[in-house]
Amino acid sequence: MAQNGVGLGLQALSSPSFDVAALDTRDFTPGILNPLSHQLFRYFAEYGVSEQMLALLLLERVVDETTDQQIPNDPRCWFERPDCPEQIAPEATLA
């Protein structure tokens, strides 16, 4: 305590708590690597998630079936930025 009889104190306690689920389970790896089913896409659309948000989050690229051209789903390409990835030509795709 100070000599004039006034003392100040501040104490803060923080102990954050959270759980982390294991991501190395037998179901996680195939689940993250396999394409989503159209039923799951439809479920989110019917639940109220906007089509634009679903396209941004769930689609990797758009494939033109007539020319086999693959167009990446990358926000950098929406505004014609110079760092937009190039479109993938049909002969460059892996078999």
Image: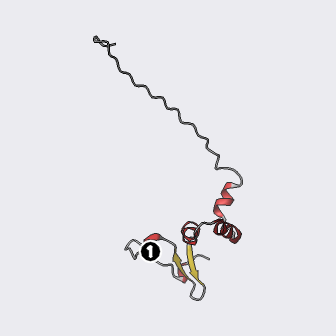
The quarter of the displayed image where residue 56 is located: bottom right
In-front residue for pair 71/54 = 54
Amino acid at pointer 1:
Cys
In-front residue for pair 9/6 = 6
Q: Residue furthest bottom?
A: 66
6 shown above or below 12: above
Tell me the SS state at disc 1. Answer: helix
Q: Which residue is drawn at 57% across and 37% down?
A: 17
Q: Residue at x 32, y 12 (%)?
A: 5
Whole-percent x, y for residue 61 in the image = 55, 74
24 shown above or below 59: above
Q: Residue at x 41, y 75 (%)?
A: 79
The quarter of the displayed image where residue 65 is located: bottom right
In-front residue for pair 13/59 = 13
Whole-percent x, y for residue 85 in the image = 45, 73
Quarter holding the C terminus is bottom right
- How many numbered marks are there? 1
Whole-percent x, y for residue 84 in the image = 42, 73
Q: Is 93 situated left or right of 31 in this image? A: left
In-front residue for pair 82/14 = 14
Dot 1 corresponds to which residue?
A: 77
Q: Is 64 situated left or right of 26 in this image? A: left
34 shown above or below 92: above
Q: Which residue is drawn at 34% across and 13% down?
A: 1
Q: Residue furthest left?
A: 4
Q: Is 60 situated left or right of 27 in this image? A: left
Q: Residues within 10 Å of mark 1 (few under 14, many from 20)?
A: some
Q: Is 53 situated left or right of 47 in this image? A: left
